[in-house]
Image: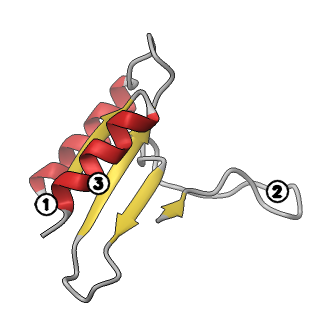
Amino acid sequence: MQEGPKGSLGGGPVWYTAGWPDLTVYRTDGTRRLWFAELKQPGNRPSDTQLACHGRLRAAGFRVTVAFTLADLLAAEAQERP
């Protein structure tokens, strides 16, 4: 699992695609599975920019899930297991 950058060590800007999901999740068993997770506090929702980015990723064949709790994220991960 890889978390998106939050800032640079030097205090300068980090260029990242607007709306990109918070987590990039990949399998380490050689199956080349890759999916994305957007993390939201309960009651919040993804922004229009995030939804547009998620739509582009899905159109390219990737899975994108929005998780509001750890249970949501673990359930999504369980669905990715062979």
The image quadrant of residue 43 is top left
- Of residue 39 and residue 11, the one placed in the foreground of this image is 39
Viewer-side label of 3, 1 = 3
Residue 15, compared with residue 37, is above or below; it is below
Q: CA distance from mark 2 to mark 3?
A: 34 Å
Q: Is residue 72 left or right of residue 3?
A: left
Quadrant housing the C terminus: bottom left
Residue under pointer 1: 60
Tell me the residue at 78%/60% (across/down).
8
Q: Is residue 42 left or right of residue 37?
A: right
Q: Amino acid at mark 3?
A: Glu
The x and y percentages for residue 3 are 55, 58
Q: Is residue 17 left or right of residue 15?
A: left
Looking at marks 1 and 2 on the same chain, the residue that comes earlier in the sequence is marked by 2
The x and y percentages for residue 46 are 38, 26
The x and y percentages for residue 81 are 19, 65
Contact between marks 2 and 3 (CB within 8 A): the answer is no
Residue 68, compared with residue 32, is above or below; it is above
Judging from the image, what secondary structure is the residue with disc 3 in? helix
Looking at marks 2 and 3 on the same chain, the residue that comes earlier in the sequence is marked by 2
User: Residue 12 — which label?
Assistant: 2
Question: For mark 3, does the 10 Å Cα neighbourhood hold few (<14), some (14 to 19), or many (20 or more) residues?
Answer: some
Q: Amino acid at mark 1?
A: Ala
Q: CA distance from mark 3 to mark 1?
A: 20 Å
Q: Is residue 51 left or right of residue 15?
A: left
Judging from the image, what secondary structure is the residue with disc 2 in? loop
Q: Amino acid at mark 2?
A: Gly
Residue under pointer 3: 77
- Of residue 9 and residue 13, the one placed in the foreground of this image is 9
Judging from the image, what secondary structure is the residue with disc 1 in? loop
